Image (tube, rainbow, N blue to C red):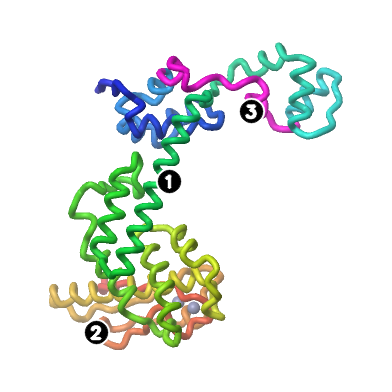
């Protein structure tokens, strides 16, 4: 179905996002050929090629100069071959080869790249794109600050809400297909509960760590959960002294987070068993199945445990590295 293109694309975040892809030279088909082209269509409310056409007509995208195009398209062996074809020296760096070729045969170089459908931002395009990216960066930093503030104050639902608000405002929010505007999704009780466990329970692997240090690791673990990535956690742990002889700080923070997730999962499985009256369910322990799994964890994973019996704590305090095991429900099928 045909849609009416936005009249003022400079106010459309999707168009500015598209423009910002072209701060460096890029094919005009880059989006049209990508697997997300239909997502782009939806966000732009027109075909990406139509939007790019408008950027070009209005002078925000231009064809790069010949030297930029050559740098973009040709690799050193290709440049050397072009030089050799013209009986030019093949020595020097990429920029030297390009300059030599342009000096010797600029029309030939233009012919060589005439099929290339590559554009990039003009000066005014660059200004607009950079202002947009800067605005996005500040927005992200603000959301991160807000999230950490909420975690410090133990306002777990609000922490989730601030992240959801941020995501809902993005052209392409994290998580394919997640509708962050849907209020039921975030804040949701699961996330708030996992954050609460992260801050209020101390797993055996973290016993003996002083409270002040542990708080920083809890913040890191909480931000892993909020953002679904390690980037913020890494920042929070920058310059923090190593806390465990068994693993690095980021892995230690991840264990704190996994401990909370594991506790939550176990609670859910038990609630389910009570609700269905099926109390013979068992718990299996899943390991990561890679070469880093230690013998202790491998042994744990071999047995099954009654859901309402003694279940080994995860992360395992006896693990020789950083335990990444998790619980899985065995319903007996
Ligand atoms: Zn282990
Ligand atoms: Zn383990």
Residue at image position (28%, 48%) is 178
17 vs 26, left or right, is left
Nearer the camera: disc 1 or disc 2: 1
Which quadrant of the structure image shows residue 66?
top right
Q: Which mark is residue 137?
A: 1
Does residue 203 lie above or below 68 as drawn?
Answer: below
Which quadrant of the structure image shows residue 65?
top right
**Residue 207 is inside the magenta segment:** no
116 vs 17, left or right, is right
Between discs 1 and 3, the one toward the N terminus: 3
On-image quarter of the C terminus = bottom left
The stretch in magenta equals 54-77
Q: Which mark is residue 73?
A: 3
Q: Out of 146 and 322, give the one closest to the viewer.
A: 146
Callout 1: helix, strand or loop?
A: helix
Nearer the camera: disc 2 or disc 3: 3
165 vs 96, left or right, is left
Does residue 263 lie above or below 123 as drawn?
Answer: below
Outermost residue to the top: 107
Can residue 325 be spotted in the picture?
Answer: no
Q: Callout 2: 10 Å neighbours few (<14), some, many (20+)?
A: some
Does residue 222 lie above or below 170 as drawn?
Answer: below
Residue at image position (24%, 73%) is 269
Q: CA distance from mark 1 to mark 3?
A: 30 Å
Between discs 2 and 3, the one toward the N terminus: 3
Residue at image position (45%, 83%) is 209
Image coordinates of residue 23 in percent, x first then y, are 52, 32
Kindly identify which residue carries mark 2.
Answer: 308
Q: CA distance from mark 1 to mark 2?
A: 48 Å
Q: CA distance from mark 2 to mark 3?
A: 63 Å
Q: Out of 252 and 178, give the one closest to the viewer.
A: 252
């Amino acid at each position: 179905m045909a849609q009416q293109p936005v009249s003022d694309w400079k106010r459309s975040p999707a168009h500015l996002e598209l423009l910002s892809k072209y701060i460096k030279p890029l094919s005009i088909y880059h989006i049209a050929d990508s697997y997300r082209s239909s997502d782009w269509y939806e966000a732009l409310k027109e075909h990406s090629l139509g939007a790019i056409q408008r950027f070009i007509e209005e002078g925000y995208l231009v064809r790069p100069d010949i030297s930029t195009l050559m740098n973009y398209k040709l690799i050193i062996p290709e440049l050397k071959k072009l030089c050799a074809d013209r009986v030019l020296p093949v020595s020097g760096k990429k920029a030297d080869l390009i300059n030599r070729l342009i000096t010797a045969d600029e029309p030939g170089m233009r012919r060589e790249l005439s099929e290339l459908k590559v554009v990039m931002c003009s000066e005014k395009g660059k200004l607009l794109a950079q202002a947009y990216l800067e605005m996005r960066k500040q927005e992200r930093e603000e959301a991160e600050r807000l999230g950490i503030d909420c975690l410090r104050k133990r306002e777990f639902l609000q922490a989730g809400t601030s992240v959801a608000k941020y995501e809902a405002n993005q052209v392409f929010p994290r998580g394919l297909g997640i509708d962050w505007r849907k209020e039921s999704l975030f804040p949701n009780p699961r996330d708030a509960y996992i954050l609460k466990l992260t801050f209020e329970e101390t797993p055996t692997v973290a016993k003996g760590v002083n409270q002040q240090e542990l708080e920083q690791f809890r913040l890191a673990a909480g931000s892993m959960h909020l953002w679904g990535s390690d980037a913020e956690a890494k920042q929070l742990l920058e310059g923090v002294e190593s806390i465990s002889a068994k693993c690095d700080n980021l892995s230690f923070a991840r264990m704190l987070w996994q401990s909370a997730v594991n506790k939550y999962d176990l609670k859910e499985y038990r609630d389910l068993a009570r609700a269905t009256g099926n109390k013979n369910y068992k718990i299996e322990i899943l390991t990561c199945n890679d070469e880093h799994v230690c013998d202790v964890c491998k042994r744990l994973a071999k047995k099954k445990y009654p859901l309402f019996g003694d279940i080994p704590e995860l992360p395992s305090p006896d693990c020789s590295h950083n335990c990444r095991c998790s619980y899985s429900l065995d319903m007996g099928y």
